Image: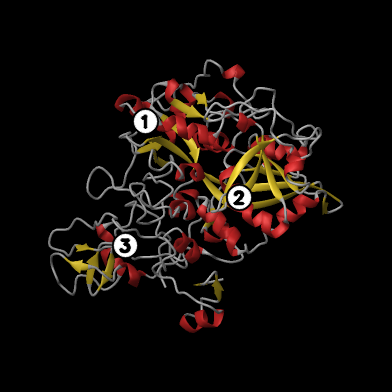
Amino acid sequence: MVGIPQEAIPGSDERGPDVKREVVLRCPLSRARTRLGLLALSMVIAACTPLLDRDPAQCHTDADCAHFGGHPYCRDSVCVSSGLMPLDCFFATSTHQPIEQDDFLNQCGTTYLRGESPGQCLTFPPVSGADATLRDPPDAGARPSSTNGDAGTVSADGGTVSADYPSCNEVTQGRALYMTGSSNFPPLLQRLTPIILNDINRTPVFLTTNSCRGVRSMYNATDHVIVNPLAGSPADSYAQYFSPEGQDGHVVGKPCKLDPGQEVDVGESETFPATCSLMTDSAKVHEVQGPILAILFVVPINSQQKAISEQAAHLVFGAGGYPPWNDPALLYVRASGTATTQLIARAIHVDPTKFWGNDQLTADRLAQNLQFVTGYDPAQSAIGILGADVYDSYRAKLKALAYQDDRQQCAYTPDSNSNLQNVRDKINVRNGHYPIWGPIHFFATKTAGNIDSAAAEDFIKLFPPQYPKDVLDAFIDSGWVPECAMSVRRDDELGNLKPASPPFLCGCHFDSRVNGDQVPPGCTPCETPSQCMAKDPNLTACNYGFCEMQ
């Protein structure tokens, strides 16, 4: 079986070789589907119809059509358009898999966005002055660094702390799970809270700091203790305990006061320890990696901008501007200790401590402020950086830009079509086209191989190699991508892409979940593995109600 590693989408450009007398086919690819790198070509060309010459002798093999370019297929003795992009893309087969980074970033697929001209994918224009010397922002010396990061946060309503806030330990009846880390984590924690309460009888208490602080909380004795903010600080700078309220059981975070000397049970981060200048010590710290979070460039919804390139972003955030993002006051950023800045910084080669822009303190605060840039001219100049999880909550007011790495021929958004607000398939993260992402990490101290905190041990048991369905759904519904739905992986921060090798697969369930629990094209519902093997011997597993290869 010959295949391509991308998933086709409704609305893809329909393009083929530019020929004179020969056949050109219009080939809709809306029902083509990958199963982690292998796609039956018969599905791709099933709906192809000839537009011109019907000469049955035009070709006998796909190789006979190669001179047209764009990887056309030979079907029924005629050359048909594949609709694949980039034009000079890496065409994967069962025996010819991507190895080099350019191979992954430029794999043949249909999940690109349309370009300005027919037969082109969306690209960002070549950047002039890309080698210009970067300039430190005016406040570079005073900007938050990876050692202090989000030391405090600002609440959206500007509220201040009440002296009547309860003790965290008392309100949780001594069954608290104390955590600290990124401001990207609370939306996911809200969905995990009912599971934590039900399965391990713990109430999560989370103090927002940043990803690097989350790592250091297990590697540094000083950071292992969390404290209350100064009197008069904003309400959301206090620790928040999460619990359901109301008849619908909606989970909310409410401020509470930490007891003196309160130790952290679990540190949360979206960065590897090395990113925070820490050496991994597996003898003293237990680490669990979880689902993937994409980091995005976002603009106001009325912005006319569609894409940004690595070189353009390098100048925007490293030199204070590049057209149309020339106003430093309209660059919305995060502190250098956050995963948002750390991952973007690595992708565009800018020192995270010298980012131009205004630190918005939390991801939610950034999204709220950016959405209110509504004037036409300011909207064209405004840009921010945001995790996909928070962006998913602001799609009606913000727009994700397609990103084009220097090694890529097309620009890609995380989802297959950024113009459709309900498309949340993260397919370009999953297949390697969108490169700015990293996994979540949970850390806990241990002694002689045993986790020190009973609460941390209980929490980590919730994440076995094959997730319980409720945990998996919490990840998906929060905008994260579980490893079992990925066809690529990394072993370090924004490192080289490699073929994924998860112990089990859940791509069908992921696609079903993000599409209203519909059965995805190419997927087979099941109750037992034997049902799957009866259909296809390669489908040896029944995972979350769908046949998978493992």
Position of the C terminus by quadrant: bottom right
Instruction: Please name the amino acid that badge 1 sits on.
Output: Val
Q: CA distance from mark 2 to mark 3?
A: 41 Å
Seen at 70% across and 23% down, the residue is 230
According to the picture, the residue beneath numbered tag 2 turns out to be: 244
Q: Residue at x 26, y 63 (%)?
A: 28
Specify whether residue 499 is in view: no
Residue closest to the far top: 138
Q: Give the alpha-carbon distance from disc 2 to disc 1, as whole Å.
A: 50 Å
Q: Which residue is mark 3?
A: 30
Q: Which residue is mark 1?
A: 127
Real-space Cα separation, disc 3 to disc 1, in angstroms: 34 Å
Tell me which numbered mark, 2 or 3, is placed earlier along the sequence: 3
Nearest to N terminus: mark 2 or mark 1: 1
* x 51%, y 76%: residue: 539
Which element is circle 3 on? Answer: loop
What's the coloring here?
secondary structure
Q: Nearer the viewer, mark 2 or mark 1?
A: 2
